[in-house]
Image (cartoon, grey):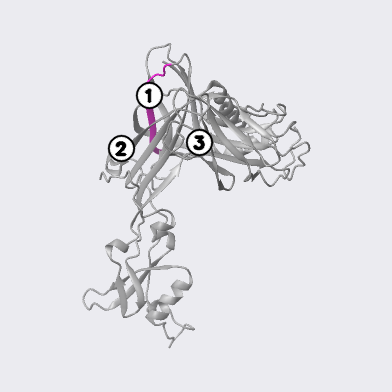
Amino acid sequence: MEFTPYPMISRSKLKTFLALSALIALSTCIDPYKPVLKGYDSLLVVEGLITNENRSYEVKLSKTLKSADKITEKVDDALISISDETGFSALLTHSGNGIYKTDSTVFTGTIGKTYTLDILTSDGQHYVSEPSMMLPVPEIDSIYYGKDSGYSGDHSKSFEGISIYLDSKAGDGNTDYLRWAYEETWKFRLPLVKKFNFFNDTTIIPISGKDLKEFCWKQQKSTSILLGTYSPSQSGNIIKIPISFIGSDQSDRLSIQYSILVKQYSISEKESRFWTNLKDVEESGGDIFGSQPYPVISNIKNTANENERVLGYFEVSGVTQKRKDITFNELLKLNLPLYHYNCTRYTTSPGDYCRGGGWGCIPPTWNELYKMWIDKHFIFIEPEYIPETKNLSKYVFAMPTCTDCEISGTRVQPAFWVDLN
């Protein structure tokens, strides 16, 4: 099977690409400060994706601005509908911030059907997308991982970790174009969990198990897009497509259990060219001073003015998905470096301080000591006692980000989650 994967493209570059596309001519003279964007128009930006998933779909509308400091403003007063070749039409509901949604009980995309996006803005401008067929998408065979090395953004440092790969069946068309995206979920535990609530030096109460902010989950969608094309006229399936690399000591993703949900989308040749253009912008440096302008590829036009530039793309894609779970115990066998939180455990007692210093100084009370550290935004973790006498000997403090997992995650376990360790 001949397969050509494209490098992963940062979605954050999309806004840069949209702003870049709005420039009719690009200057080759680089001004490192604030550019004067002559000939820069306010253009409609459309972001939309419908699939065969049973869910609500979103279309986002915005407009580019003539300011160098801003990219877009939201469009909140449009009428939007999606129709198919049978005459069925679904009206989208505005949910705020330029986002319009379908009703999942009324409309779900179907493989083989052709869909058209219709937009009517409050100033009477009418925009229509090209009819796009929802193409079939092959099933994902497997997702797996292997020990690998990766590099920092400037390639100055290398990291050990794992690469996650995908195998897929071949498609049914003459030439198939695919796009991949993924959603990450992982469980983690902070090293310095707050175990006691402090009321005063004689009332320090243990926190019960259900209230301990010990284990949490983080979730994150991919900020990159991976594209590829292959020809089913040659035998064989898609083998070992790299989806993601995780440095084992660069984040807490692999510290307990990690789960990745990979989605495989069928896309058209024209949409593939749209994302390939975005790749070209990335490789050129991704700024508005690139030496070569890149052509706008969009499937949306103003019905009264076909020469008007419309930015973005109405995506119609079949999708299939597969999940892979990876446990810490599995990774131990690979002898990878482990992640360590940048957290410090601070122990202190009144004897560590004296008011004014020198002979005869008066140390703070336990209650005063507690307030001193809390005023510096530390969190009380637990007390320490002298084993023989059971007398109070130390207070233990840490920074909030090291004690409360809800600062960076959630204690609500995802519905699909099953602990495997």
Residue at image mark 3: 224
Q: Residue at x 48, y 70 (%)?
A: 376
* Pointer 1 residue: 168
Q: Secondary structure at mark 3?
A: strand
**Within 10 angstroms of label 2, few (less than 14), some, or many (20 or more) residues?**
few
Amino acid residing under circle 3: Ser
In the picture, the quarter occupied by the C terminus is top left
| Local secondary structure at mark 1 | strand
Q: Earlier in the sequence, mark 1 or mark 3?
A: 1
The magenta stretch is: 160-172
Q: Outermost residue toward the front?
A: 87
Task: Identify the residue shown where x is 49% and y is 83%.
Answer: 356
Towards the viewer: 155 or 84: 84
Q: Is the residue 199 above or below the residue 150 in the image?
A: below
Name the residue that disc number 2 marks: 334
Q: Of 397 and 183, which appears nearest the observer?
A: 183
